[in-house]
Image: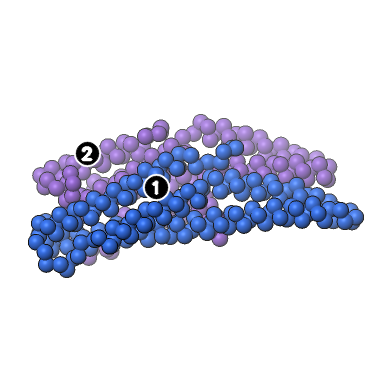
Chain colours: A purple, B blue
Amino acid sequence: MDLFKQFPRFRPFASRAEPLVPASELEKYPTFANDFRILDEVLVPVYVTLNEEAMTQQNLYRWMYIFLIFGGALATILGIIRLAFDVEVIGLAGAIVAATLGCISLALRSLPYHKRYLNARLAAEQLRGEYFLFLGRIGPYADESQRLAHLKQRVLRIKHEGERNESV
Amino acid sequence: MNRSEMQQFLQFYQLHRHKNQLDYYVKREKEYTHAQNQAIWLSIGLIFLAALAGAFEAIPVSWFQLTCLLLAAICPILSTALAGYNALYAFEQQAKIYRDARQNLETLAVQAPDIQSDQDEAEFAQQVERFVLETELVLNTERGYWGQLAKDMKPLDV
């Protein structure tokens, strides 16, 4: 069901982590072997780190809200069932759920999951663009003597932006 | 880069950047549109069930009355939770962003330089550069819209 396809996962990297370009595809373009090697050293490790960071933070952020949304519904439903059946243990369960939700709500306000996920995702996508611009010697990468220095500089700047805990 | 290298780059770029992103947008647009429709139908189903339970609650069988009362109370709560879930993922807005990006990439695909053409090397290089920069502009714009949307992707009442 598409509605729950993006539901947070217990192991976010189990099936979704994909390389920027599969290694088997890179072998088909020996002309760019040297550029691929540079990109693998300078850009790809930062991209992988930011991509994984984005996936982890997104997963945690979504879990928090899922707990809040469905936990809130569960607490109310337990309250209704308690009224209908007058079983004390249900009331106790409702109280525990409500207390847990309070803690999660506090955590959501104090932990920067959302900002870290946003910054890391945007930075990872920006790096993906730089990968192809560098390879095609396009824009700021047109100058052969400066392109490597420019790449290193750009990667460092984007990495710094992606690791920020506040909004860019 | 000489002409042959430029042709190889164009082929690589079209496959691993342009087509890769296009496939991603097509998949996501379809998935989020379906998800939005499913959320709407599920919500309607829950409200309908609550209304039905309210109507049948008048039947004087004690266990049936209790079940109907519980259903009439619980279904709207689940429907509200579903609305919160829907707001967390912003399916409709995300589908729109991906649809716009897909349409822009499809338009650019038509204007892509011809790899086999025998035009002047400098002119071909210029065309490739223009194609790449325009594609990156579309992707940057999509990223900007997504960033703005993602900032607010959370349920209003939580």
Q: Chain of mark 2?
A: A
Residue A163, placed above or below residue B67: above
> SS for tag 1?
helix
> Observer-nearest residue: A160 or B92?
B92
Give the class, few, some or many, for how many residues have Cα within 10 Å of label 2's Cα (few <14, many ≥20): few
Separation of marks 2 and 1 at Cα, in angstroms: 22 Å
Query: What type is the residue that disc 2 sits on?
Result: Gln
Residue A24: x and y in percent read 28, 64
Residue B118, placed above or below residue A96: below
Residue A30: x and y in percent read 17, 62
Give the class, few, some or many, for how many residues have Cα within 10 Å of label 1's Cα (few <14, many ≥20): many
> Observer-nearest residue: A147 or A19?
A147
Q: Quadrant of the C terminus of chain A?
A: top left
> SS for tag 2?
helix
For label 2, the residue is: A153
Residue A81 appears in view: yes
Would residue B98 be found to the left or right of residue B51 on screen?
left
Query: What type is the residue that disc 1 sits on?
Result: Glu
Residue occupying the point 51% across, 47% down = B90
Residue occupying the point 31% across, 50% down = B138
Q: Could you say which quadrant of the image residue B113 lies in? A: bottom left
Residue A19 appears in view: no
Q: Quadrant of the N terminus of chain A?
A: bottom right
Q: Which mark is residue A52?
A: 1
Residue occupying the point 23% across, 53% down = B132
